[in-house]
Image (cartoon, helix red, strand yellow):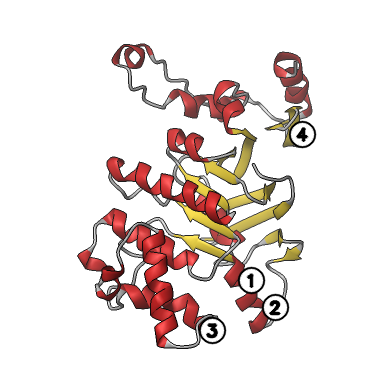
Amino acid sequence: MATQEKLVEIKNLKQYFNVGKPNMVKAVDGLNFDIYRGETLGLVGESGCGKSTTGRTIIRLYDATDGEVLFEGENVHGKKSKKDLLKFNRKMQMIFQDPYASLNPRMTVADIIAEGLDIHGLVSNKKERLARVHELLETVGLNKEHANRYPHEFSGGQRQRIGIARALAVKPEFIIADEPISALDVSIQAQVVNLLKELQREKGLTFLFIAHDLSMVKYISDRIGVMYFGKIVELTTSEELYNNPIHPYTKSLLSAIPQPDPDTERQRKRIAYDPKMHNYSKDEELKLREIKPGHLVLCSEKEYAEYKKQYGN
């Protein structure tokens, strides 16, 4: 992690969806965390835990039900003029999960990548526009000859590279990568992740990397937040999370990771997680508490005392 300067601050963020009375889905339920400039924060959890909704709410694809998202100290969900929104959208971009659905099949690669350049008026003529497209294609490992082709002519890994080039076009500071490798073959996943790491080093980017592949998240992330039913249950450095997990749900997730060694895999024991094991009373306050320096766990006061005693040294 390059610096401890806060780039993004999430304060009591909530995203509720009304699916018909009296049902209310609490997809994101009171999140509090920071993302530091120059780091990659991984966000992991099983399908339906709210991690993708978190990313989309941060970037304002969804209006937050409650809470704040501060980007460079400014409230993302505050009232903004069209000019302010354009300025914000240039600084924060998103790479989407599905490289097949996220690219317009009727547009050439050049027009897809240059769409942000056109919207923000970042090029003054067609020659400059094309030169910038060629530069971006080469940056993500494609050729300038690809500019005049259409998305259906590319593989899934190549399409995701086009999506990355589109996100880079406006020179953002912060990129939300929403499960960018989940739809790709395993052989291609490492290539895309290595590309993101290289781009981060070269351009000083900050990433929120959303995924359910825990081994890949460990490889790319400086810190990792584990989500369960709309809440972050554990947040710490990548190495600390994998070596010294504290929350029972984190332990359950880690126990599910397949091991490459056949002997080790045969001996691997899956840890089941039952939320009823906590046995909270209605008046107990659950919040992220620091068990060790930089290692936060969602727990009650009673659990906090137990975790401190067991793991605090």
Amino acid, disc 3: Gly
| Residue topped by disc 4 | 284
Asked which quadrant contains residue 55, the reply is: bottom right
The amino acid sitting under disc 1 is Phe
CB-based contact (under 8 Å), mark 2 and mark 1: yes
**Mark 4 surroundings: few (<14), some (14-19) or many (≥20) residues within 10 A:** few
Residue mark closest to the camera, 3 vs 2: 3
**Coordinates of residue 203 in the picture (x, y in percent):** 56, 56
Q: Residues within 10 Å of mark 1 (few under 14, many from 20)?
A: some
Q: Residue at x 58, y 71 (%)?
A: 90
Camera-nearest label, 2 or 1: 1
Circle 2 crowding by C-alpha within 10 Å: few under 14, some 14–19, many from 20: few
Q: Secondary structure at mark 1?
A: helix
Q: The disc labelled 4 sits on which kind of residue?
A: Glu
> Label 4 to label 1, Cα distance in Å?
39 Å
Q: What is the quadrant of residue 70 in the picture?
A: bottom right
Indicate which disc residue 88 carries. 1
Answer whether residue 99 is visible to the viewer in this image: no
Tag of residue 121: 3
- Mark 4 secondary-structure assignment: loop
Q: Quick check: 233 above or below 88? A: above
Q: Nearer the viewer, mark 4 or mark 2?
A: 2
Residue 303 is left or right of residue 28, and the answer is: right
Please state which of residues 33 and 136 is positioned toward the viewer in this rendering. 136
**SS label for mark 3:** loop
| Residue located beneath label 2 in the image | 80
